[in-house]
Image (cartoon, rainbow, N blue to C red):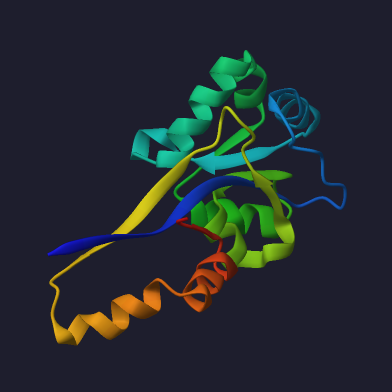
């Protein structure tokens, strides 16, 4: 068979407030996390990829204690986004694809370097006539636009 790389799902931040802080660098991220009163993210003890990553980020930034005092551990990204949408929390940490599916206007952005986190989606397929047309479509600019629309980063 063959493998093609499709797109990456990227960890990001949703915001329920009208003002959207900058996320250009690690210092901006630290400041944004310290300034808000409430944050939700998926519970790392449940195996949440973004939740586990976020814990590492706040530890690296030296703000774990401050953030955890105002954190709500959600069951998953869907619950995180429900908390953001209902304005029960100011920031939600989850996959950008989950943010966009819930409400794209709430997207603040991806984590700045060096905290970017992405998971690559690939497709393994048998090279036969039944799959060729489908696979060819998945490589087109139209398919890449669909990936982007749904919060995924197309593979370049």
**Relative to the observer, which residue lies in front, 1 or 80?**
1
Picture quadrant of residue 58:
top right
Q: Is 92 located above or below residue 134 in the figure?
A: above
Q: Is residue 16 visible?
A: yes
Q: Find residue 92 and report its horizontal and vertical position in percent.
A: 63, 46
**Relative to the observer, which residue lies in front, 50 or 140?**
140
Name the residue: 49% across, 23% down: 56
**Relative to the observer, which residue lies in front, 89 or 3?**
3
Q: Is 69 located above or below residue 105 in the figure?
A: above
Name the residue: 30% across, 76% down: 135
From the viewer's perspective, tell me whether residue 15 is left or right of residue 111.
Answer: right
Q: Is 29 located above or below residue 16 in the figure?
A: above
Q: Is 93 located above or below residue 150 in the figure?
A: above
**Relative to the observer, which residue lies in front, 141 or 92?**
141
Residue found at the far right of this picture: 19
- Number of disc labels: 0
Q: Find residue 111 and report its horizontal and vertical position in percent.
A: 61, 38
């Amino acid at each position: 068979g063959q493998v093609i790389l499709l797109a990456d799902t990227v960890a990001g931040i949703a915001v329920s407030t009208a003002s959207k802080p900058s996320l250009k660098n690690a210092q901006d991220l630290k400041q944004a996390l310290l300034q808000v009163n409430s944050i939700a993210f998926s519970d790392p003890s449940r195996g949440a990829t973004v939740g586990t990553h976020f814990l590492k980020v706040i530890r690296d930034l030296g703000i774990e204690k401050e953030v955890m005092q105002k954190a709500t551990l959600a069951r998953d990204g869907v619950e995180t986004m429900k908390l953001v949408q209902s304005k029960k929390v100011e920031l939600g940490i989850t996959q950008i694809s989950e943010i966009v599916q819930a409400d794209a206007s709430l997207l603040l952005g991806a984590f700045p370097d060096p905290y970017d986190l992405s998971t690559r989606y690939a497709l393994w397929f048998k090279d036969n006539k039944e799959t060729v047309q489908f696979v060819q479509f998945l490589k087109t600019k139209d398919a890449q636009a669909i990936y982007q629309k749904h919060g995924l980063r197309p593979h370049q």
